Image (tube, helix red, strand yellow):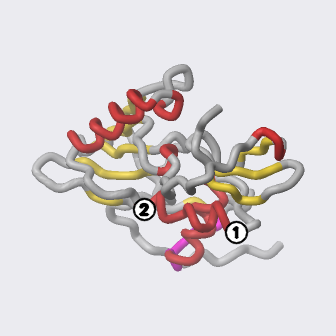
Amino acid sequence: MGEPAILKKFGRPTHLVTHRSADTWVADFEITIPRKPLPLFIPARLKLAYGYWTEADGSEVLFSRDYKPLWRLTDGRNPERLQPWLWIDKVEHEWFWDDTNTPWRSPRRLQEEERRLHEFGVVALPKLADILPDIVFNKMTKDVRSAVDLMARREDTEAIETFVGWTRYPSVRSVKRVKVVPEYH
């Protein structure tokens, strides 16, 4: 469809990273390799805000299409780059767009969403974009969630493992650290 992609694995099926997905599967005959390589791109779902959560103190947290925190916006302060595994206590939420008008379907919409970030004072990439190498090269990461969990295990020694195996993290504000001792029956 003329969309840029990063080739993860050529074959049947061929695996690609696109703006839409961290692991798109297509037939090998459905891709076209340009004569001149395209510049590397950061998939839009790793850098654009899908919406925002409002916290109790009035701060707003921009979140990605995968509901990962990107930036905290607080009046009078520069945007705060957030770890994508943080749990945000929210009191409200709003979305900027939906799946019928995604920014990756239109260059104009992509520019609008990039302009929105600039208006918020965001002039850098969010921490979430740092998972791109794991998405492309690590066979254990199939989606954004698994790549974020891998990043968290490497970078956050305070991680909490839940009973279903997903990693969940405490709120970023003030957290009282407690040692959890498993009970044996």
Q: Which residue is mark 1?
A: 138
Whether tag 1 and tag 2 are in contact, CB under 8 A, the answer is no
Q: Which residue is mark 2?
A: 127
Q: Which range is magenta?
A: 156-161
Residue under the image location 62 percent in, 69 percent down: 150
Q: Is residue 142 above or below residue 181?
A: above
**158 within the magenta span:** yes
In depth, the one of 52 and 65 nearer the eye is 65
Q: Left or right? Give the position of 148 relative to 92.
A: right
In depth, the one of 38 and 42 nearer the eye is 38
**181 within the magenta span:** no
Could you tell me which quadrant the N terminus lies in?
A: top right
Residue 54 lies, in percent from the top left, at 32, 38
Residue under the image location 80 percent in, 57 percent down: 10
In depth, the one of 74 and 159 nearer the eye is 74
Residue 13 lies, in percent from the top left, at 85, 48
**Mark nearer the N terminus (1 vs 2):** 2
Secondary structure state at the residue bearing disc 2? helix
Q: Look at label 1 and name its amino acid.
A: Asn
Could you tell me which quadrant the C terminus lies in?
A: bottom right
